[in-house]
Amino acid sequence: MKYQIGDDIIVLHSNEEGKVIDIIDEKMIMIEVRGVKFPAYMDQIDFPYFYRFSKTKIVEEKKKVAKVFVDNIPKEKPQPNQIKTPDGVWLVFIPKFAFDDFDDEYVASLKVHLINKTDQAYKFTYDNQLQGESHFQLQNEVLAFHDFYIHDIAFENINDSPSFNFDFNLSIPDKKKNDHFETILKLKPKQVFQKIEQMKLNNEPTISYKLFDEFPDRIFEEYFDLGKLANKGFKIYDLSKIKDHLDAARSVVDLHIDKLIDDWQGKSSLEILNIQLKEFEKWYDLAVANKAKNFIVIHGIGKGKLKEEIHYLLKLKKEVKYFVNQYDERFGYGATEIFFNN
């Protein structure tokens, strides 16, 4: 549903502003304009901030257009069938504008909509996080070629580096498709502010991010004849005894680059970070495979980029019970201790 009770609206025929007070059905809502309540079709109203982008001189138009009374609003005409072209699933932000004491316009909040431009319906789990902490959660369904209003976020929360986490699955299961699909959108304040300015210049009403084009297909594993591989000299291990063939897990791993490679001086910061994260993943996986109870990662203090990336990864790993970054006599504040769900 595009509109919610309490939304500000504008009547397109008269340019009068009002509020939504009730939802009648998918095509009609009850609105209140200057104390008068009456029903209106969806195509007879719009959001005021949408209208400001589509009409550059709304004040002048109000003077030119004669008032249209409720009784004179024409009935909705039947629309011809339209061919809908699939174009993925989008997360759309609609700025809600307000005016300060000096009558300057500013963005007060963002309305968050999930737009499904595909011919499939999806169930989804949504988690909005601010500074890594869960702020708003929701489970629901978005139908094919429909949009779904999720919630509003205060524009000031953009400074808290919000992330929008989704876990999708098909409403009607398909054996050829994955059981679920996870995706995360992380917003950086500077980029959002730039997009707001670009949106104004282009006279556009929304900021849009595509989450995915098509729900991913299931990847079927090919069958391998292990006997033939063994005859060719490959080592075949019993899965139940796989732990016997793993490298020993470490309780502490030092990710300082000079501890990992010798020729690090000529590498860029990004190359160094990638090497450190690969080393972290290697020893993390071994700790999990060996059912370790805890694991310490030394990342140092520095600018905090390595620590930030490791903490972000740990929040996504289901094996992690919790982790702490506190003062330790051995490492100061330059290490994080990870505790597993074993």
Image (cartoon, rainbow, N blue to C red):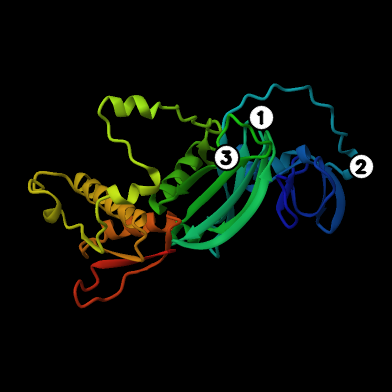
Q: Along the polypeptide, which appears first: circle 2 or circle 3? A: 2
Quick one: SS at disc 1?
Answer: loop
Residue appearing at x 44%, y 61% in the figure: 132
124 and 153: which is toward the camera? 124
- Label 3 sits on residue: 179
Relative height, residue 103 to residue 141 (above, below): below
**Residue 238 image offset from top left, x and y in percent:** 37, 42
Return the mark for residue 119. Answer: 1
- Label 2 sits on residue: 71
Instruction: Farthest residue to the right: give it.
Output: 71
Relative height, residue 189 to residue 239 (above, below): below
User: What separation in Å lies between label 1 and label 2 (alpha carbons)?
Assistant: 38 Å
Q: For mark 1, does the 10 Å Cα neighbourhood hold few (<14), some (14 to 19), or many (20 or more) residues?
A: some
Residue appearing at x 57%, y 39% in the figure: 179
Q: For mark 3, does the 10 Å Cα neighbourhood hold few (<14), some (14 to 19), or many (20 or more) residues?
A: some
Q: Amino acid at mark 1?
A: Asp
**Residue 101 image offset from top left, x and y in percent:** 55, 65
Q: Is residue 331 left or right of residue 159?
A: left
1 and 331: which is toward the camera? 331
